[in-house]
Amino acid sequence: MDDFYQLKNGLIISSSVIAGLFFGPVWWMYSLKVASSYLLGASVGVLYLRILAKNVEQLGSGNTQVGKGQLGVFVLLIVVATQWNQLDVLPVFLGFLTYKVGILVFALWSAVLSPSTNP
């Protein structure tokens, strides 16, 4: 379980750092409205990742059913983005997908830093 907790924390940290690094350039290239929409989506994406990790953790304790709350988080985010005039839907959606970039960066970083087991 220690490996799982290290993986979970690494994924959450990498996703948060990627979101923070993207926020500035998005603000600079577009506007504060677009950047804040992106940041909201990225924050909900990290929350989604935490909920997903919690459900995966419960699978190891004998619970074989994964919760359905993850989909609800995404649906709620999109509903709020479409109904609230202060948000842009596309930056919110792309911000939400930032957690996937964080996963890729963490996986590549781990692959480069881990010693090779092949002779």
Image (cartoon, rainbow, N blue to C red):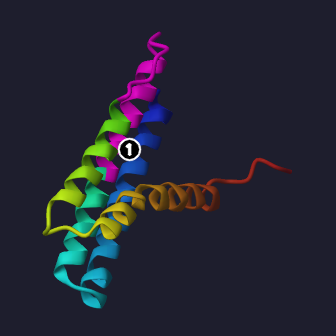
Instruction: Return the residue nearer the eye: 11 or 79.
Output: 79
Badge count = 1
Q: Position of residue 32 (x, y in %)?
A: 17, 80
Q: Residue furthest front?
A: 83
Q: Is residue 43 left or right of residue 53?
A: left
Secondary element at tag 1: helix
Q: Position of residue 77 (x, y in %)?
A: 26, 51
Q: Is residue 31 left or right of residue 104?
A: left
Q: Position of residue 67 (x, y in %)?
A: 38, 24
Q: Is residue 108 above or below residue 53?
A: below
Residue drawn where x is 34% and y is 52% of the image: 45
Q: Residue furthest right?
A: 119
**In the image, residue 49 lies in the stretch drawn in magenta:** yes
Using a 10 Å C-alpha cutoff, classify the residue at mark 1 as few (fewer than 14 neighbours), some (14 to 19) or many (20 or more): many
Image quadrant in which you'd find residue 8:
top left
Q: Is residue 82 left or right of residue 8?
A: left
**In the image, residue 39 lies in the stretch drawn in magenta:** no
Q: Is residue 69 above or below residue 20?
A: above
Question: As shown in the figure, which amino acid type bears the numbered disc 1?
Answer: Leu
Q: Residue furthest top?
A: 62
Residue drawn where x is 27% and y is 87% of the image: 30
Instruction: State the predominant SS element of the stretch in magenta.
Output: helix
Instruction: Return the residue nearer the eye: 31 or 18.
Output: 31
Residue drawn where x is 38% and y is 28% of the image: 68
Residue drawn where x is 36% and y is 30% of the image: 54
- Residue bearing mark 1: 49
Q: Position of residue 87 (x, y in %)?
A: 19, 67
Instruction: Return the residue nearer the eye: 49 or 9.
Output: 49
The residue range painted magenta reads 45-68
